[in-house]
Amino acid sequence: MKVTGAEVVIQCLKEQGVDTVFGFPGGAVLNVYDALYQHRGDIHHVLTSHEQGAAHAADGYARATGQVGVCIATSGPGATNLVTGIATAYMDSSPVVAITCNVGLALLGKDSFQEIDIAGITMPITKHNFIVKDVEDLADTIRHAFRIARSGRPGPVLVDIPKDITANQCEYKWQDSSMDDVEAIDLDMEEIEKGIQMMKESQKPYVFVGGGVVSSNAGEEVRRFVELLDAPVTDSLMGKGGFSGTSPRYTGMLGMHGTKTSNYGVSECDLLVVLGGRFSDRVTGNVGKFATHAKILQIDIDVAEINKNVMVSQSITGDIKQVLEKINQRLEQQYHPEWMKKIESYLRQFPLRDSTDRLTGPGVVKEIYRQTKGEAVIVTEVGQHQMWAAQYYLYEKPRSFISSGGLGTMGFGLGAALGAKLGCPDKTVINIAGDGCFRMNLNEMATAVRSKIPIIQVVINNHVLGMVHQWQELFYEKRYSATILDDVVDFVKVAEAMGAIGIKVTTPEAFSKAFEQALSAQKPILIDCQIDCGGKVWPMVAPGAGLSEVFDSEDKK
């Protein structure tokens, strides 16, 4: 049958099983929005307050569900407002399809009203992008975009459609989507056997869990693997939940704000097995001092990540889940009792410490963990609160921690929390923000109220840009340039003005009571937690230092 290009877009979304999209309309995308209206019973459109919020919401939806998230925007500024969200998804390998509509074909390249080369702009921050110039190509292009977004190492794809293409007609035939239509990577069994031999020879192995474990849904395979290898486990920010944070083998996060146990242990191990990690500078510290006593075995689906930041001894290219299935079938039970005892002694010697006599960021996170019993989806912005959420909440399952790791996007969390809650309506979703981050996209509280999305927004409010302020104190002789937020913005009144509940707290007891109320509120609620600006994220590895040079407040004294 013949239908318009706009109808093709909607039908292809339905083919892919999409039931929720996030966006903001405009002139060039009107035909698509008209088709969305016709199918409003099949696809739920969430009107965000800003296109950036739509991109982050699609990203949060993808991270929480493992499915492809979708956002829609119009031409020009509508499209460019997606860019930060697309870049955020790209850096953290999140599967998102962004659909933009441009000016008509005859107006392209003529600096027309609200025209922008969004494909050119996003080329470095997408897995692939398309400009559709013939309506006959539209359906296959959208299908291909979804395959690319979810295949291999996931990531964002952009499809730009000139307005007249959405109005033109073509023949359309429904195609059932197969989630198994992505190309499988053939495993090199010789690589696997070499990796197993390294494990057999090791006396002090350590396992590092990265975001690839979460993307691959390989949690059970990892659990079995570390038992066979008899090794301690650390993780990256993106790897949270890939291995249970309540396991006695878990030693906390690795890197700049990793635990002393993990940083010392990786510095002393003789084999580091890296599962889906890309050796971010925040993980390695000084690369020349990273794991100098260890052979490194890197397992990753993206061959471009092998030897990119750290030279490794051996690599295995493939999907983490599939690779570990093969290894678990072949690896004999290993035993390292002395090594495990040493790591356990580090855990006893170097616990995370926090004051309990006043309201603090770590204290807020620990109370959230206590009341949610570790079963919530925690979303964060970027900064001190992000690190506290990573350190003090124990993540037992994949996709329970959602944060901007690679790009470090302030303003990410609230939009992402909306997407996560719509993707996982039966779960409690909490966005933990700093006051600096919350200002950036606080307009999405109005989206939460308008769309009746009951998220909990916790603001760790220390009236400074906390992480930058910390660096200025430690490394810039307390020259607090542009990091003190000495205004009188009242977040409670802001929340109430947008139709949400707002509560301000200053003590641990008040927060406990407010959060208990939030869990039962069934509507958007904001808790403004007033804490001291002197709080720090400990431990810390200074820039240019090695992981073994990690220090905390006691060392500083």
Image (spheres, helix red, strand yellow):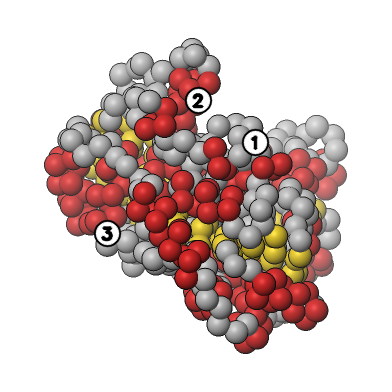
Q: Pointer 2: what residue?
A: 471
Q: Quadrant of the C terminus?
A: top left
Q: Position of residue 373 (x, y in %)?
A: 27, 62
First reached walking from the N terminus: tag 1 or tag 2:
1
Q: In the drawing, does residue 524 fall left or right of residue 74?
A: left
Which element carries disc 2, helix, strand or loop?
helix
The residue at 59%/58% (across/down) is 269
**Residue marked by disc 1:** 77
Q: Position of residue 246 (x, y in %)?
A: 37, 64
Of the two numbered discs 3 and 2 on the same chain, state the one appearing first in sequence: 3
Image height of 223 relative to 519, above or below: below
Look at the numbered disc 3 and give the secondary structure of its residue. helix
User: Can you tell which quarter of the image residue 134 is in?
Assistant: bottom right
Three-letter amino acid code of the residue under disc 1: Pro
**Mark 3 = which residue?**
372
Residues at discs 3 and 2 in contact (Cβ within 8 Å): no
Marker count (numbered): 3
Disc 2 crowd rating (10 Å Cα; few below 14, some 14-19, many 20+) is some
Query: Which comes sooner in the sequence, label 3 or label 1?
Result: 1
Which residue lies at the image location 41% right of the left edge and 18% below the top edge? 484
Real-space Cα distance between discs 3 and 2? Answer: 32 Å
Give the CA distance from mark 3 to mark 1: 40 Å
* Along the line of sight, the residue nearer the viewer: 331 or 176: 331
Q: Residue 399: which disc? A: none
- Asked where in the image residue 321 lies, by quadrant, the reply is bottom right
Asked if one can make out residue 380 in the rendered structure from this viewpoint, the answer is yes
Q: Is residue 142 left or right of residue 71?
A: right
Residue 94 lies, with reference to residue 24, above or below; the image says: below
Give, as a three-letter code, the residue at label 3: Thr
Position of the N terminus, as image quadrant, is bottom right
In the rendered structure, are the residues bearing label 1 and label 2 in contact, judged by CB atoms less than 8 Å apart?
no
Mark 2: amino acid? Trp
